[in-house]
Amino acid sequence: MKKAQVAGFCIAIIAVCYYLSFADRYDANESSSPSSGFGVMLVFLMLLVSALLLIPSSVRLWLKKTRDENQFSGPVWLSLLALNSILSLLYSAALLWLIFMTIKFSM
């Protein structure tokens, strides 16, 4: 559980930093640039991997028994769990929004 929490958090941070590195240089006139499309796709895939790691492990770690079994205690680990739980909720909300928009535009 600890490895999944740390890896998911690190991947999310790397994805955001990578996005910020090329988002400033993105120009509306160059929207057809293949490199910007590749960058956005890479960020999306990194966030997807982060979501696949964080959502199940965060949900399981909400139970105190599971946290005790995995020795997931202390202020640092509980702070990481809180941050990852927020990320999990954001990922879930984004997925629900994407499903809603897909249904809305398909009708």
Image (tube, rainbow, N blue to C red):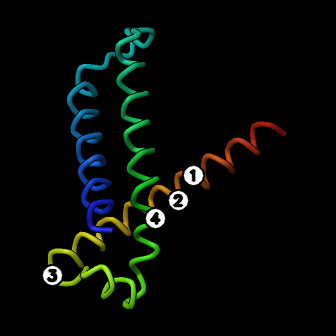
Whether residues under marks 2 and 1 lie with C-beta atoms below 8 angstroms apart, the answer is yes
Q: Nearer the viewer, mark 4 or mark 3?
A: 3
Q: CA distance from mark 4 to mark 3?
A: 21 Å
Q: Quadrant of residue 14?
A: top left
Helix, strand or loop for disc 1: helix
Quarter of the N terminus within the rendering: bottom left
Q: In terms of secondary structure, where does tag 2 sit?
A: helix
Residue sitting farthest toward the front: 69
Q: Amino acid at mark 4?
A: Leu
Q: Position of residue 19 (x, y in %)?
A: 28, 33
Q: Horizontal placement of 77 versus 37: left or right? A: left
Circle 4 is placed at which residue position?
A: 89
Identity of the residue furthest to the right in this view:
107
Q: Earlier in the sequence, mark 3 or mark 1?
A: 3
Question: In this rendering, would 87 be left or right of 79?
Answer: right
- How many residues crowd mark 2 within 10 Å: few (<14), some (14–19), many (20+)? some
Q: Which residue carries the number 2 mark?
A: 92
Q: Residues within 10 Å of mark 1 (few under 14, many from 20)?
A: few
Query: What separation in Å lies between label 3 and label 1 (alpha carbons)?
Result: 30 Å
* Residue pointed to by mark 1: 95
Q: Earlier in the sequence, mark 2 or mark 3?
A: 3
Residue name at image x 24 percent, y 48 percent? 13
Q: Residues within 10 Å of mark 3 (few under 14, many from 20)?
A: few
Dot 1 or dot 4: first in sequence order is: 4
User: Type of residue at label 3?
Assistant: Pro
Numbered circle sitting on residue 75:
3
Q: What residue type is disc 1 on?
A: Leu
